[in-house]
Image (spheres, rainbow, N blue to C red):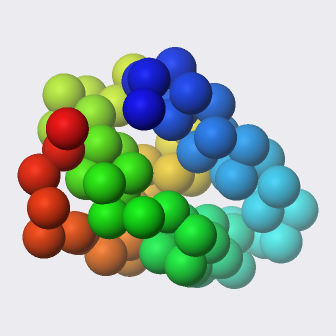
Amino acid sequence: MEVHDMVRMANQIASFFKGYGHDEALKEAANHINSYWDPRMRAHLFAYLAKGGEGLDPLIIEASANIRKPKVEAA
């Protein structure tokens, strides 16, 4: 997956859930990524976050504390 595609998708998730209020948005964004992103996508997200996460919505950065870390390495 290309970085810009992953950032775009993560930011779309953040935008969707922002209307839920901050705490609920954090929970639901993490829930969505845990439920619908396969382990490779989540590994890619965490690898990108480790490099600073440039361009990611702050909601996704904060929600990452509740996103399950996969056991696979980022491709």
Task: Name the residue at 68% across, 51% down.
Answer: 14
Q: Residue 65: in sight, yes or no?
A: no
Task: Name the residue at 31% across, 54% down.
Answer: 40
Left or right of 57: which side holds 72? left
Q: Position of residue 12 (x, y in %)?
A: 73, 43
Residue 57: quadrant of the picture: top right
Task: Name the residue at 30% across, 43% down.
Answer: 44
Q: Position of residue 59 (x, y in %)?
A: 56, 52
Residue 48: quadrant of the picture: top left
Number of dots carrying numbers: 0
Q: Position of residue 47 (x, y in %)?
A: 20, 40
Left or right of 53: which side holds 6? right
Left or right of 25: which side holds 36? left
Check the image and report above or below for 47 versus 67.
above
Check the image and report above or below for 19 versus 12.
below
Q: Position of residue 69 (x, y in %)?
A: 23, 69
For the C terminus, the quadrant is top left
Comparing 74 with 23, the one in front is 74
Check the image and report above or below for 46 versus 37.
above
